[in-house]
Image (cartoon, rainbow, N blue to C red):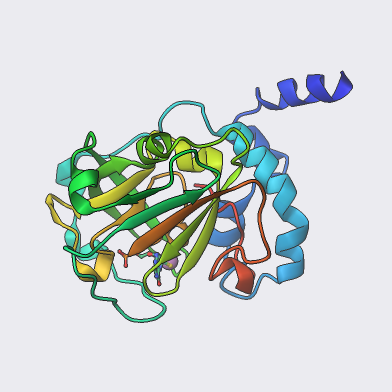
């Protein structure tokens, strides 16, 4: 009972109050430079469950405010790639969706194009010290997971990329209505360097969570040892904006 009451109270705290309490998670830690000057994995692991709980409470409070198309400046978007730019043949591309789902899927680009499309103009924030307003369009990740029949036991999503980049997300962020599997950028097909044919895009997480060249999604009950390409080097896991 006591725990329920505490949880209910916490949902009334807004982000400013959380910041005031010094309880804020990923973005402020990272943008303060910790990830860049070597936030140790120990600290990352110690704060992660708290971050996850607090940040999760801050989700589901309605959409993050977006930008106008005329605020996009394509020059601002830099390319970040840890292992070159893989060239994926669009005709042979398949998105695998498996794990805790009732209907494992292998979707080609036509199947993705047949789902409802959405454009979101959002700010992309990279911890390396740059940001850019970008218009991404594609399908909601939630729609793809619904198509696969995601289990109630699915708490996490693992994301594989063609360049061997790896990510894991909490399922609430994956199901957020502003989380897209994007196939277009600024009104044109996604360029290879920016993740063609399919990448993640959302205004609720830092740039390093937004996997490019996505090839596989796996719904999981819990996190396994590998949490992410950069997270396993000490970057904060939730990375909420
Ligand atoms: N597969 C893959 N996804 C990735 C990366 C990467 O190296 N490989 N870099 C990440 C980082 S740190 C950022 S900031 C964004 C950059 O996206 P952009 O290159 O389209 O600007 O992609 C993210 N997704
Ligand atoms: Mo980044």
Compared with 181, 42 (above or below) is: below
* Quarter of the view holding residue 141: top left
Taking the view exactly as shown, the residue that stands out farthest to the bottom is 84
Q: Residue 136: horizontal and vertical position, in percent? A: 24, 48
Taking the view exactly as shown, the residue that stands out farthest to the right is 2
Taking the view exactly as shown, the residue that stands out farthest to the front is 103
Residue at figure coordinates x 18%, y 63% from the top left: 90
Quadrant showing the N terminus: top right
Compared with 168, 100 (above or below) is: above
* Quarter of the view holding residue 75: bottom left
Residue at figure coordinates x 23%, y 37% from the top left: 115
Q: Is residue 82 left or right of residue 74?
A: right
Q: Quadrant of ligand 1?
A: bottom left
Q: Nearer the viewer, residue 98 or 162?
A: 98
* Quarter of the view holding residue 62: top left
Q: Residue 100: horizontal and vertical position, in percent? A: 55, 44
Residue 178 visible in the displayed image: yes
Residue 16 visible in the displayed image: no
Residue at figure coordinates x 46%, y 35% from the top left: 149
Q: Residue 72: horizontal and vertical position, in percent? A: 20, 51
Q: Is residue 147 left or right of residue 185?
A: right
Residue at figure coordinates x 28%, y 64% from the top left: 195
Q: Is residue 37 left or right of residue 218?
A: right
Q: Nearer the viewer, residue 222 or 41?
A: 222
Q: How many marks?
A: 0
Q: Residue 235: horizontal and vertical position, in percent? A: 60, 66
Q: Nearer the viewer, residue 192 or 8?
A: 192
């Amino acid at each position: 009972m006591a725990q329920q009451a505490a949880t209910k109270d916490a949902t009334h705290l807004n982000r400013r109050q959380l910041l005031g309490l010094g309880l804020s998670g990923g973005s402020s830690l990272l943008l303060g430079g910790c990830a860049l000057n070597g936030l140790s994995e120990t600290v990352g692991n110690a704060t992660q469950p708290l971050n996850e709980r607090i940040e999760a409470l801050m989700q589901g409070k309605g959409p993050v405010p977006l930008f106008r198309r005329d605020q996009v400046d394509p020059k601002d978007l830099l390319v970040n790639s840890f292992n070159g730019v893989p060239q994926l043949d669009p005709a042979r591309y398949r998105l695998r969706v498996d794990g805790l789902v009732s209907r494992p899927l292998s979707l080609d680009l036509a199947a993705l194009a047949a789902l409802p499309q959405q454009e979101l103009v959002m700010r992309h924030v990279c911890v390396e010290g740059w940001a850019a307003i970008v218009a991404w369009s594609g399908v909601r990740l939630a729609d793809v997971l619904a198509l696969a029949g995601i289990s109630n036991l699915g708490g996490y999503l693992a994301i594989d990329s063609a360049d061997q980049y790896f990510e894991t997300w909490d399922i609430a962020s994956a199901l957020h209505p502003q989380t897209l599997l994007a196939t277009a950028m600024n009104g044109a097909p996604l360029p290879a360097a920016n993740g063609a044919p399919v990448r993640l895009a959302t205004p609720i997480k830092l740039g390093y969570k937004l996997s490019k060249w996505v090839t596989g999604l796996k719904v999981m009950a819990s996190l396994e040892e590998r949490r992410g390409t950069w997270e396993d080097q000490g970057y904060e896991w939730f990375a909420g904006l």
